[in-house]
Image: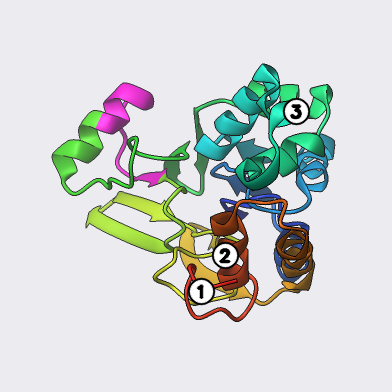
Amino acid sequence: MKILLISDIHSNKEALDAVLASEAGFDLLVCAGDLVDYGTNPSYVVDYFRSRTSATVLVHGNHDTHLVECYNTGEYLEVSGKSYKWIHHNCERLDRARVDYIASLPTHLTFSADGWEYLIQHQYDQSYGIIESRHQFDEYWKEHAGTSCPRRRMIFGHSHRQCRHILWDGMEWLNPGSISYRRPDDPDKSANYMVIDGGEVMFRSCRYDRSVQLAEAEAFRRSGRMMDTEVQDFMFFFGNARTSRDPL
């Protein structure tokens, strides 16, 4: 079985399209959450998953939860000037049906493939913590997946750092990274993801058109309507700024 493993799409249509085009022919699509926020096209991303009729494993992330809360409270309708953020931008571009779909996504799921048992959840804890020991792994598995088995993998997103941690034979956790953007200490501009084919884990990345994200940020920079730090992030993530706090 060929699994396409992605995470942290963040409303980035261009990155999602590029990854899907690069990996045609997968049998199962697995996504570790954060479909929306900090990107320009949330409706496209949500509609892609809503319309999928083939095998998909999908959980929600912290940005998904934040968007649902922001939409349900109506906060985004009352924001003006320099308090405006990408979360408000995304809420304006979604409707009730799409938000309800995001809200319906589970926190964690389990599935099996090629002799491995998988547990997927967006984040391990409320920060950027990781599982460091086999004891931690066993306890977390017991709490969220139940019965143990010889070959187990956990999948997390959230950190936007692509990695594979092997704690013991048959005891691993994976993070495919983000297909949209990196953390401020990482200047890489590619879409990061993983492919698991016949149980073998492969790190992948591909380039995509960042100009759409950048153009929308430029428009907000000119209008002065959005919070400066939100625009600065985009100038770094999708443009050529040297840091995420370069002057506008």
Q: Tell whether 200 sits left or right of 98.
A: left
Q: In terms of depth relative to the viewer, which is nearer, 106 or 169?
A: 106
Residue 139 lies within the magenta run: no
- Give the amino acid type for the residue marked by disc 1 in the picture: Asp
C-alpha separation, residue under disc 3 versus residue under disc 1:
29 Å
* Residue at figure coordinates x 58%, y 68% from the top left: 237
| Label 2 SS | helix
Q: Residue at x 84, y 37 (%)?
A: 51
For label 2, the crowd category at 10 Å Cα-Cα, with few meaning under 14, some 14 to 19 and many 20 or more, is many
Residues at circles 2 and 1 in contact by the CB criterion of under 8 Å? yes
Amino acid carrying label 2: it is Gln
- The spot of residue 97 in percent (x, y) is 82, 23
The three-letter code of the residue at mark 3 reads Leu
- Which segment is the magenta one? 140-154
104 is higher (above) or lower (below) than 3: above
What residue did someone put label 3 on? 77
Instruction: Please name the residue shown 49% across and 60% down the image.
Output: 177
Q: Is residue 143 magenta?
A: yes
The color scheme shown is rainbow
SS at mark 1? loop
The numbered disc on residue 232 is: 2
Q: CA–CA distance between discs 2 and 3?
A: 23 Å
